[in-house]
Image (cartoon, coloured by chain):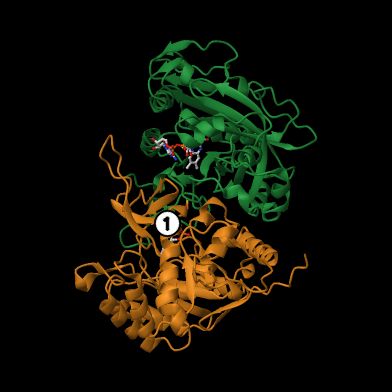
C-alpha cells in the first residue's frame, strides 16, 4: 500500500501545533523535568501545572493514591506563584521551543483575572488554560466550572484582559450537562475548550476506616476515566464546538496511539497526556511517532481529517 | 576516582528508561529478595539513588496473555514501544540501588568484583504488596523496565572521620552501596543493622550470628562485607542475634561506651520510626546525619508532586516548605526534617 505523507500539524485557537500531542496540566511539571527524557520541541504544545497569584504549598501528604486503572490526587495546586513562574520557569520553558500553554487557577474571579493578565503580557505564553475546577471562596466554595452562569462570568472577565494569548477553558466533568458549561464558556469568549479535568472521587481503607488521602476526596484520572472523557468530548463537539468551530483539546486516560485516534474521532482537535507520563515519561513523543504511523496505515493525510469522524450506525 | 569528580559526573547523568535483565536472584531472610540486574556498561549512580520499576513489563508474557501473534507484534506498535506501558494498574515502584559494579560471578553475594563487561546493579525487594510480589516472581532472564538513576545521593565526608551507617529492614539496601563506595574512597566505616530477629535481616550470614545481649560487638558474619572487612553491629528486637533492642539503642550504647568525641558522620536508611530516632540521636550528640526517606511516589521524576515532605526552611514565613522526596531527596540532612 502506498502511504500518504502525513502532515500532523493542527491549530488550537491561534496556537500552531506541529502535531496534536500536548502534555496535561499538573502531570508534566514546568518542563525541565520531562526535558531530561526527551526534546520538548517534539511536542505540539506544553501545558504547565496550575499557576496561582501567590505561591501555594499544597495539601499535606498523602496526596496521591492508586485506584484500579487510575489514580486519585489531591495535590492542592502546589505551585511557585505567577511572579516566580514568569521570572524563572517561563524563560526556561521558552528555551525548549515548544508552544507554552499556562494553566491558571484561583479562588476568586479577581485572582484569575490578575494572573491571566500578567501571563497575556508575556509574549512567550501562547495559551492560557483556565482550570475552573477550583472552589470559589466567595460563592461558598462551589467550583467555578459547575454552573453555567458563574463560569460565563469568569470567562468574560478573563477575556477582557486576554487579548493576545489563546484562551482555553478546561471544563470540569463534575456537572449534570457538559454541553451547558461548554456553551457558556464558548459564548463568553473561549477560543478553545479542554476536557476533561479529573472526576471527583474518594478512597478509604475498609478495614481501618482511614481515607487514603489527607484531603479525603481527590480527582480521579487515568484509563479509568477515558470512556467518560470520550463521551463528553463527543457531546461538546456535537453541541457546541463543531457548530461554532471552537476546537477541543481532549484528555483523560490517554496512554496509547489508539486512545489518540479515539479522541480525534470523538471530536478533539488535539490530545493531552496526563497520568501516563508517570508510568512512562516518554509517552508523549512516542504518541507523536505512533500517530504518524497510525494515520499512514489509515491512509489519512492529517489528523484534521479524523476530527469527529465516527462510523455511526445508520 | 576522586570524590568530587564522581559526584559531578553522576549529577550530570540523565535518567533513562531501560530494560534490565534479571541475572540472579538471592532470597534472603523473611520475604527479602536480592535481584541482580544487568545494566548498560555506562551506568553511573551513587548510593542513595533509586530506580523506579514498572511492575508488569514482561513483553513475552504480555503478548501471550493478549493472544497477539508474533507477526502483528513485530509490525505494530513495536516501532514506538508504546506497548510497554499497556499494563495497568500501577505506577512504578521505587527501589534503592543497592550495589553497583562490573561483575562476572553473579552467584557470589560478596562485593562486586571489578571485571570487564557489563555493569551489575542490585536491588533488595521486600514483599509487601502487588508490585513487590511481582518482582519476587520474576525469573532469571526476564526484563525489568526501570527509570533511573533518580534522586540525589549520600555525600561522603571530605575528611577521614569514621562514617557510621545505620540500616533497618530493606533500608540496608543503599547502606551496602554506601559501604562499598566509602571503602573505594578509603574512608573508614562501621555499620549498624537492625531487624526484628536474626531471620529478618536481609543479609547473608557466613556463620550463625551470636546474641550479645546489651554488649556492642562488631561482627564479621556479614558475607557481603567480607572482602572489605567492614565491621557490622547487628541489633535484633528479640535478641536472637547481636545486641538486644532497637538499632538506634545499639548506636546510642556505642556512642556512650566506645566513642571518645572524635568527629563522626551518621548515615541512615530504614523505617520512619527508625529515622526519627536516628535524627534524635544525631541531634543529642551534635553529629551530622544524612538519611534516605521513603515516601509514596507517583512518578519519581518530579512532575506529580505527590512525594512532598516537610523540611525546615528559614527563608519561608512558616519556617518550613514542602520539598520533593524524589528530586530534593531521598537523601536529606536529618537536621532539616520536620516529622509530622
Ligand atoms: C526512594 C525509595 C527507595 C526504596 N527502596 C526500597 C528498597 O530498596 N527495597 C524495598 O523493598 N523497598 C523499597 N522502597 C519501598 C518500596 O517502594 C515499596 O515497598 C513498594 O513501592 C511497595 O509496592 P507494592 O506494590 O509491593 O505495595 P502496595 O501494594 O502498593 O502496598 C502494599 C503495602 O505496602 C505499603 N507501602 C506501599 N508503598 C510503600 C512505601 N513507599 N514505603 C513503605 N510502605 C509502602 C502500603 O502502605 C501497603 O500497606 C523504597 C521506597 C522509596 C520511596
Ligand atoms: C497529580 C495530578 C495533578 C494535576 N494537577 C492539575 C492542575 O494543577 N491543573 C489542572 O487543570 N489539572 C490538573 N490535573 C488534571 C489533568 O490535567 C487531567 O485533566 C486529568 O488528569 C485527566 O487526564 P489523564 O487521565 O491523562 O491524567 C492533575 C492531574 C493529576 C493526576
Ligand atoms: S514522585 Fe512525583 S513528584 Fe516526586
Q: Residue furthest front?
A: A314
Q: Is residue A177 above or below residue B77?
A: below
Percent x, y for residue A76? 34, 60
Q: Is residue B256 above or below residue A15?
A: above
Q: Which chain is orange?
A: A
Image side of residue A179 versus residue A23, left or right: left
Q: Nearer the viewer, residue B118 or A174?
A: A174
Name the quadrant of the N terminus of chain A. bottom right
Q: Which chain is green?
A: B
What is the tally of numbered marks visible in this picture?
A: 1
Image side of residue B56 versus residue B242, left or right: right
Query: What residue appears at the point 73 percent right and 29 percent down from the top-left corner?
Result: B113
Residue bearing the label numbered 1: A225
Q: Chain of mark 1?
A: A
Q: Nearer the viewer, residue A191 or A79?
A: A191
Q: Nearer the viewer, residue B180 or A242?
A: A242
Percent x, y for residue A88? 50, 71
Q: Nearer the viewer, residue B38 or A271?
A: A271
Query: What residue appears at the point 45 percent right and 63 percent down from the top-left corner?
Result: A230
Q: Residue furthest left?
A: A140
The quadrant in which residue B122 appears is top right
The quadrant in which residue A192 appears is bottom left
Cβ of mark 1 under 8 Å from ligand 2: the answer is yes
Percent x, y for residue A74? 35, 56
Percent x, y for residue B115? 78, 32
Q: Residue furthest right?
A: B116
Secondary structure beneath label 1:
helix
Residue B269 seen from this side: no
Amino acid at each position: 500500500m502506498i502511504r500518504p505523507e502525513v502532515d500532523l500539524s493542527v491549530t488550537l485557537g491561534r496556537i500552531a501545533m506541529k502535531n496534536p500531542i500536548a502534555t496535561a496540566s499538573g502531570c508534566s511539571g514546568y518542563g525541565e523535568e520531562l526535558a531530561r527524557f526527551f526534546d520538548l520541541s517534539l511536542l505540539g504544545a506544553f501545558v504547565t501545572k496550575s499557576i496561582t497569584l501567590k505561591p501555594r504549598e499544597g495539601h499535606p501528604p498523602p496526596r496521591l493514591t492508586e485506584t484500579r486503572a487510575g489514580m486519585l490526587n489531591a495535590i492542592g495546586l502546589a505551585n511557585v506563584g505567577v511572579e516566580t513562574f514568569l521570572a524563572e520557569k517561563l524563560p526556561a520553558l521558552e528555551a525548549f521551543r515548544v508552544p507554552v500553554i499556562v494553566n491558571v487557577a484561583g479562588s476568586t474571579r479577581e485572582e484569575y483575572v490578575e494572573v491571566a493578565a500578567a501571563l497575556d503580557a508575556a509574549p512567550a505564553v501562547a495559551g492560557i488554560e483556565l482550570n475552573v475546577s477550583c472552589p470559589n471562596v466567595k460563592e461558598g466554595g462551589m467550583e467555578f466550572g459547575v454552573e453555567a452562569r458563574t463560569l460565563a462570568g469568569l470567562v468574560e472577565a478573563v477575556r477582557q484582559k486576554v487579548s493576545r494569548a489563546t484562551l482555553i477553558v478546561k471544563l470540569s466533568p463534575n456537572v449534570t450537562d457538559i454541553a451547558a458549561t461548554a456553551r457558556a464558556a464558548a459564548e463568553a469568549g473561549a477560543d478553545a475548550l479542554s476536557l476533561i479535568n479529573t472526576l471527583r472521587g474518594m478512597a478509604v481503607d475498609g478495614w481501618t476506616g482511614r481515607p487514603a488521602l489527607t484531603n479525603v476526596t481527590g480527582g480521579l484520572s487515568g484509563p479509568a476515566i477515558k470512556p467518560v472523557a470520550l463521551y463528553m468530548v463527543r457531546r461538546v463537539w456535537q453541541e457546541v464546538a463543531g457548530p461554532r468551530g471552537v476546537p477541543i483539546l481532549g484528555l483523560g486516560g490517554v496512554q496509547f496511539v489508539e486512545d489518540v485516534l479515539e479522541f480525534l474521532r470523538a471530536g478533539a482537535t488535539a490530545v493531552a497526556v496526563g497520568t501516563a507520563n508517570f508510568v512512562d515519561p516518554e509517552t508523549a513523543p512516542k504518541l507523536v511517532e505512533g500517530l504518524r504511523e497510525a494515520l499512514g496505515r489509515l491512509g489519512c493525510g492529517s489528523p484534521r481529517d479524523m476530527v469527529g469522524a465516527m462510523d455511526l450506525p445508520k | 576516582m576522586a570524590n568530587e569528580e564522581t559526584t559531578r559526573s553522576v549529577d550530570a547523568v540523565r535518567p533513562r528508561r531501560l530494560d534490565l535483565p534479571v541475572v540472579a536472584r538471592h532470597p534472603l531472610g523473611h520475604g527479602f529478595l536480592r535481584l541482580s540486574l544487568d545494566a548498560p556498561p555506562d551506568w553511573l549512580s551513587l548510593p542513595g539513588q533509586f530506580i523506579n520499576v514498572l511492575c508488569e513489563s514482561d513483553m513475552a508474557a504480555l503478548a501471550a496473555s493478549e493472544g497477539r501473534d508474533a507477526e502483528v507484534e513485530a509490525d505494530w506498535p513495536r516501532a514506538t514501544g508504546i506497548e510497554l506501558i499497556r499494563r495497568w494498574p500501577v505506577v512504578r515502584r521505587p527501589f534503592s540501588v543497592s550495589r553497583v559494579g562490573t561483575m562476572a560471578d553473579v552467584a557470589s553475594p560478596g562485593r562486586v568484583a571489578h571485571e570487564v563487561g557489563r555493569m551489575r546493579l542490585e536491588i533488595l525487594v521486600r514483599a509487601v504488596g502487588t508490585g513487590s510480589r511481582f518482582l519476587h516472581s520474576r525469573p532469571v532472564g526476564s526484563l525489568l523496565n526501570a527509570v533511573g538513576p533518580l534522586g540525589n545521593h549520600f555525600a561522603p565526608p571530605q575528611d577521614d572521620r569514621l562514617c557510621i551507617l545505620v540500616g533497618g529492614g530493606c533500608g540496608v539496601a543503599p547502606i551496602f552501596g554506601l559501604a562499598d563506595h566509602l571503602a573505594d574512597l578509603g574512608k573508614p566505616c562501621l555499620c549498624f543493622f537492625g531487624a526484628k530477629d536474626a531471620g529478618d535481616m536481609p543479609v547473608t550470614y557466613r556463620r550463625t550470628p551470636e546474641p550479645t545481649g546489651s554488649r556492642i560487638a562488631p561482627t564479621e558474619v556479614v558475607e557481603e562485607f567480607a572482602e572489605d572487612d567492614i565491621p557490622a553491629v547487628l541489633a535484633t528486637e528479640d535478641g536472637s542475634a547481636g545486641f538486644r533492642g532497637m538499632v538506634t539503642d545499639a548506636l546510642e550504647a556505642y556512642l556512650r561506651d566506645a566513642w571518645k568525641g572524635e568527629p563522626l558522620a551518621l548515615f541512615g536508611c530504614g523505617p520512619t520510626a527508625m529515622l526519627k530516632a536516628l535524627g534524635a540521636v544525631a541531634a543529642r550528640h551534635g553529629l551530622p546525619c544524612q538519611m534516605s526517606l521513603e515516601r509514596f511516589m507517583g512518578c519519581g521524576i518530579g512532575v506529580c508532586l505527590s512525594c512532598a515532605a516537610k523540611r525546615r526552611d528559614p527563608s519561608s514565613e512558616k519556617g518550613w516548605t514542602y520539598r520533593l522526596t524524589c528530586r530534593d531527596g531521598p537523601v536529606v540532612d536529618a537536621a532539616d526534617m520536620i516529622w509530622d
